[in-house]
Image: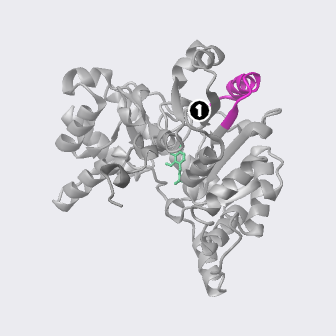
Amino acid sequence: MSSTATDIRLADRLSGVGFSEIVLIRNKILAMKRSGHEVFQFEGGEPFAPTPQAIKDACTQALLENKTRYAPSSGIPELLQALAEKLYKKNNLVVDPSQIIVVAGGMHGLFAAFQAVLNQDEEVLLFSPYWTPTKDLISMTGGKTVLINSLRARSEGITATLKAQLTKRTKLLCLASPQNPTGLVWTREEMVEIANFVKEQNLLVISDEAYEDLVYDGQHVSIASLPDMYRRTLSTFTFSKSYSMTGWRLGYAVAPEPFITGMKQSVLYSTNGVSTPTQWAGLAAIKICEGFISDNLGEYRRRRDMLVEGLCELGFECEPPAGAFYAFPKISKELEKYGKTSRDFANFLLEKATIATVPGNVFGPDGEGHLRFSYSVPIETIEAGLEALKKVL
Ligand SMILES: Cc1ncc(COP(=O)(O)O)c(C=O)c1O
C-alpha cells in the first residue's frame, strides 16, 4: 500500500499548540552574551536563590542508599504522607494521601489535570493575562480557552464577568493565584465569589498554586478549601518556586475521585512517576526547609519595592504586585514613542539598552500594553538595569 501526504502529517491535536516565545527571547540573549554584551536579565521565571543545601544532601543520601529503583508511580508513601500534612497545615485541606500525586513540576500537574477532565471542544474559563503554557495545555486536549480579564472582573464584578462568557460547553474554570504575570492575588471574598459561581453553574476548577508561598499583600487561599469545593477542584502545586527547585522537576497535585485516578493514569502513561532520589529531596524540603520560604519572602519584597519604585520614578505606571515575583507595568506612554506593540518596546530595550524583558502579549491579548520584569534577580541587576533604562528613555 502506498502512503499519501495525509498519512505523514502531525496529529491535528497539536495544530493549535504553540512554542513559548520566551525561548526565542532567551536565544537572542544568549547570542548577545556570546558576542560580549552585558545583558540585564529580567525575562526569567526562576527564584534568585540556589536550592537549599539540606535538599541537595537528601538527594545525595538517597543515591548513596541506592534509592534508585522504580517508586510507586504516584509517589513514595513518605512524601505523600508529608504532603497530606502540609496541605492540612498550610492549605486547610483534609486529604488522604491516596488523593495526592507526585508529578514532574507544576507543568506536569496541569498537564495531567487538563488531560483528566477535558473533552474535545469543551470550554475553559481562564483568568487572563495567563501563564502562556496554560492555554497550550488546554489546546492539547482539544478543549477551548475562553479568556476572562482578571482586572475587569475585579472592577466590574466577578460573577457578571464570568456569566457573560458562559456557554453550554463550559466545563471548568482555571485560575492561578498568585497570577503570573500580573502578581494578582484573589482575596478570600473574591475566591468565595468565584467558588459560588462555580457551584451555581456546576463547573470544575483547576487551581494552579505555583506561587502560593510568594504573597506579600493579603493571604493565599486554596479554593478547594472553601465549602463544598474540594469535590470539584483539581489543585496543582510545585517545589520550583517555593524551594528554588525549578530544575528538579518536582510538584504534586490533589484531587478527589474520579479525577485523581484520571491524573494517575495520565502520569503513569507519560512519565511513570518522578525520579526516586528527587522525591527524597522533596521530602527534605517539606520537612526541614520551612524557614527557607519565610526567610526569602523579605528578600523578594525588597526586590519588588526597589524595582517598582524605580519603574514608577521613570514614568511607568506600575502597581506593586501582591504576589509572585514579576512587575507588570503599563507601557502606554512608552508605546507612543518607541513602537506600536509591547514586542516592539521589548525589542527596543533589548537592542538599545541590553535590558531583557517579556512583552505582555506573550501572556495573551489582555497582556498587550505591558512588559513583564522579573524581580527575582540580584539586587545589582535591578540597580544597573534601572540605570540603563534611565539612559535610554
Ligand atoms: C503560574 C505558573 N504555574 C505553573 C508553573 C510551573 O512551574 P514548574 O513546572 O517549574 O513547576 C509556572 C512556572 O513558571 C507558573 O508561572
User: Where is 369 relative to 114, above or below?
Assistant: above
**Of all residues shown, which one is farthest toward the front?**
1
Residue at image position (51%, 59%) is 246
Query: Which amino acid, by three-letter code, is at mark 1?
Result: Glu
**Residue 314 part of the magenta segment:** no
User: Where is 239 relative to 358, above or below?
Assistant: below
Residue 163 percent location from the top left of the image: 63, 16
Res 291 seen here? no
Q: Which quadrant is the N terminus positioned in?
A: bottom left
Tell me which secondary structure the magenta stretch mostly adopts.
helix
Residue 379 percent location from the top left of the image: 40, 50
* Secondary element at image label 1: loop
Q: Which residues are magenta?
A: 185-205
Of residue 187 and residue 256, the one placed in the foreground of this image is 256
**Residue 204 part of the magenta segment:** yes
Q: Is residue 373 left or right of residue 141?
A: left
The chosen color scheme is: one colour
Mark 1: give few (<14), some (14-19) or many (20+) Cα within 10 Å. Answer: some
Residue 388 percent location from the top left of the image: 24, 42
Residue at image position (78%, 53%) is 99
Q: Which quadrant is the C terminus positioned in?
A: top left
Q: Is residue 87 left or right of residue 302?
A: right
Q: Is residue 86 left or right of residue 378?
A: right
Residue at image position (29%, 47%) is 384
